[in-house]
Image: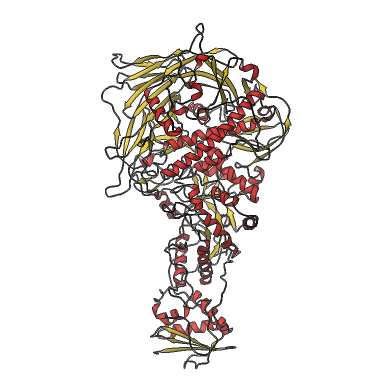
Amino acid sequence: MGTLLHLHWKKKYSLSASIDVHQRSIIVKSSSARTVTGYPDIKGGPEGAEDINNICENHPAGADVARRVRNYSPRVVAHRQAGPTHASSSLAARPPPVTVHSPRRPPSVAPSPSSHSPLRFSSERASMGPVRLAILAAVFAAAAAGVGEAVYIPYNTSAGVVPGKLNVHVVPHTHDDVGWLKTVDQYYVGSNNSIQGACVQNVLDSLIPALLKDENRKFIYVEQAFFQRWWRNQNDMIKDTVKGLISSGRLELINGGMCMHDEAAVHYIDMIDQTTLGHRFIKEEFGQIPRIGWQIDPFGHSAVQAYLLGAEVGFDAFYFFRIDYQDRDTRKGTKELEVVWRGSKSFGSSADIFAGIFPKNYEPPPGDFYFEVDDESPVVQDDPLLFDYNVEERVNDFVAAALAQANITRTNHIMFTMGTDFKYQYAESWFRNMDKLIHYVNKDGRVNALYSTPSIYTDAKYAANEPWPLKTNDFFPYADDPNAYWTGYFTSRPALKRYVRVMSGYYLAARQLEFLKGKSKSGPTTDYLGDALALAQHHDAVTGTEKQHVADDYAKRLSIGYTKAQDLVSTSLGCLTESGTKSRCSSPTTKFSQCLLLNVTYCPPSEMDFSKGKSLVVLVYNSLGWKREDVLRVPVFSDSIVVHDSEGREIESQLLPITSASLNIRDKHVKAYLGTSPGAKPKFWLAFTVSVPPLGFNTYFVSSAKKSASVSLKSTVYSSQGSKDSNLQVGQGDLKLQYNAAGALSLYSDSKTLVEANFEQKYKYYIGQDGNGSDPQASGAYIFRPNGTVPIKTDGPVPLTVLRGPILDEVHQQINSWIYQITRVYKGKDYVETEFIVGPIPIDDGNGKEVATEIVTNMATNKTFYTDSSGRDFIKRIRDYRSEWKIEVHQPIAGNYYPVNLGIYVEDGSKELSVLVDRSVGGSSIKDGQIELMLHRRLLHDDGRGVAEALNETVCLDNQCEGLIIEGKYYLKIDPQGEGARWRRTFGQEIYSPLLLAFSEQDGGNWANSHIPKLSAMDPTYSLPDNVALLTLQELEDGSVLLRVAHLYEAGEHRELSALASVDLKRVFPDKKIGKIIETSLSANQERAAMEKKRLKWKVQGPPAADEKVVRGGPVDPSKLVVELGPMEIRTFIVSFDRAISGNQLL
């Protein structure tokens, strides 16, 4: 047999091991055998393991013998019967394991809180003495005990945090997109697997029994849209089991929103709403309050997420992954991947949150630790009866990854994110391998591994009592390579982005009306629209980074929700016009309709025939808390029309001819949407000014004009074609615009503010990089990578068509064959409105195009501009500069683009130029004095980030498809320095919450005799302060009311309006008696006082800050019911009403 080494020891049973060095086999016998001369008898059981080790190390074939012996795991023991039994069928077939050298151990004392890097973990490798000894001890102890065959030995997964050791927090998780390559329902049920093999139902079905197998196993789940689908389908036994797992902390619901929302292309109100939906479900169903933010996949991170959707919802920490690759590399070197993020200038340290940035991604650590059944990573194979035994290698890989991560992380705690997209479809496969890793790693002893959650990890970090580096502002823009800035998605799918924004404002108004009417347990509700909007905030939804069929699915859900909410709104308005707010009503006789396609010049109610004596009733609802005046526009046929207000007075109106550009859009899109052609085309836009009370409505009447009556004035039409005039001026009020002989804007002047500025407005497009060349990165749904800039010019002057009238002036320009523009100046307004129609973008030259408009002035802006953070705070941007790390500029255009949800502005010390938008777009100031907005993108190549589809949106009609046309608006104003904030905040709120229009008709009679023509739900002498907005007024299932009010200004933003504001709830609800009011967290799942008391307060590095002057409102006195609001403060309440005490407020 070759050279034999006989090992022998005595206890109750005799055992000898014959090791054939040449044949590389081991024979374990139960019969007695002589000991090798020169070697002492070896003690039985675990005590003998060290002796065995010494013999093997001192034998001439020592290293190989040692490796052979240590391949026995605790699960394999010797047979009791006489005769040889092979412990491995062919050890010769197994490759020799790699020799591993002993590590330098972590210090045995806890890290010093005074130093940010007390531990330096070495990745030096040496022999695996400890793990080998443990295995040998277990093997021979079992054999000595007389066990006759292989038996189950449980893995020890009970480890907790060990002071002084490097603690590896193993966090099992799955990342389940609520739509991306497949729709949300396809992902849930597991259909359409030709695109992606993913089934969330399998994840949750297999997770529960896997957790039950070992009480130490843990898991976190995030996306409530999936979890709630699954929960509704479970029986009571499963539900009880899950509740037990959640209450014990073994299954933790973190983040807690319906989706993992985006942070660039979303509005803060939508972020709050979708988070509230999830958080309240978790509280009501499980009594739990999520305390960790888990935004691991959004493409950059906003300051609003940190302080508002982090600290203000009660989170103790916030974990994420995607930051600029240069920023990440810098932070690794300085150990600043974990910081305290101070996202709010107004709140200062009171809204600090611990923020953890993952070192590489949100997947398992380097070393191949993916354990789905079809993954390629090597499993932990610890059965020596089988081939490919690899415990030593797997433990070494784990420890090496841990030590590497420890050396870029402060304290002796690191997190391993064990999971990724749609993993754990067979959960036991993951947990089986993690059980083994934890067991063997802890026997090895170099590091301590434990099942954990982000909550446990956060508590461990907090317990270290370390001061942390301070982070301010945000993490935009995000790049993962020198030529890969993820700034294209700020604009991608602009039609979907606009749809989401319109539905968001509508949802806000519809919930108010649902409350004013009284929520019904039957009949239409706003719930479906709320769910659809929540899904649309997902970071692969409103972002435009999903496949086309998935984008269609989001739009379809919004459309269904819109239709259902429309029924609720119509019913509510019918009830309110008949009986006000004094009683509940469910079946009004008055029927209202709405024009869901008014954006494409289609409104059947207003296109009625007025010649038969009928009149159009236009009810205008204002969801804002202050009185509002605005100009309405509806399409009509007749040119003989008169408009009356609710008191019967004739009001000024104006007719503007509808352009062929608008009518062409109407014909195509109405048929595409409804399946039928819209019929005869209206000839005019009817424009008239309305005045609507706060949180209320007013009614207007449009009818055919009698011969003796004055009629709506037709606009005078002027064309510059053939004109020799050198300049043209438009504007009936204080604000005037001047055009030069070339048909270009040249001068802005406001006689009220005395502001005058030269400026021009023009279009250009960036050629989308196609991916050819040394760097294959293309421009796509995510990535903006321009390959040249092309100004959009026309041959010769641009002809102007000017419409003038008593209410507004319009300037129409056909910029080129696929861009049409209308510029409006209203007599009673102090801003410029620009409507653009862009598309279909031509691609016949083989180039994708990214279309931008730019406003150019001679302002000296010193590379500086300001953009909003999710529609809330404004953040200072400096071109080619990052405040916390040195940027190497590779993409001077794409690398300076930022998300714009509310607006963008520049200033030069004497004036401010502000531009507000009607949806999320990308924007920048590429040159001093310039602002640009990207309006539309049509690209021909995929950008390699997973969607595997070019961003080439089309609309198909009658089997013919053409590129998508985008219609939208932006708004411009120039103010004296320091005065722009008022317009940005007030008008920005009006853009978000447009007036809601509903239509009915009357045939003779007097509407006012049978209806309430004008109503405010608030005290008729009261309105909210100019610096306060009503964000939420929603009746909940139990009859209580969710109320949110927000201060609109930052500290120091405006000399008057940044002050403390107050809201008198008795006057907001004059016909109701408030019986109880409870202030809650932002997501309304816990009392505010309790939240603030338990939220962790983190130490920050550096000298103490100067005394902060944070202004927040005080507690609400239940007798006075006045809510105070400091700058940027949003306060949330659950209000219970006793009973109605008076009728509606008639005006």
Q: Residue at x 58, y 66 (%)?
A: 159
Q: Where residue 895 appears, x then y in whole percent? A: 37, 42
Give the x, y percent position of residue 699: 58, 20
Quadrant of the rendering where the C terminus is positioned: top right
One can see residue 735 in this view: no
Q: Against 205, is 23 above or below?
A: below
Q: Is residue 81 above or below residue 599?
A: below
Q: Nearer the viewer, residue 531 or 217?
A: 531
* Residue 1021, visible in the rendered structure: yes
Colour mode of the rendering: secondary structure
Where residue 137 appears, as percent x and y from the top left, is 54, 79
Horizontal side of residue 791 vs 1137, given as left or right = left
> Which of the 4 image quadrants contains residue 20?
bottom left
x and y percentages locating residue 339 in the rendered image: 51, 50
Identify the image quadrant of residue 614. Answer: top right
Q: Is residue 587 above or below residue 8?
A: above
Question: Residue lying farthest top?
Answer: 708
Task: Give the answer, above or below, for where 83 lies relative to 168.
Answer: below
Q: Report how many numbered discs are placed on residues in the image.
A: 0
Q: Nearer the viewer, residue 1048 or 516?
A: 516
Left/right placement of residue 292 relative to residue 794 reads: right
Foreground pick, 730 / 164: 730
In the image: residue 255, left or right of residue 677: right
Q: Pick the quarter of the image with the N terminus.
A: bottom left
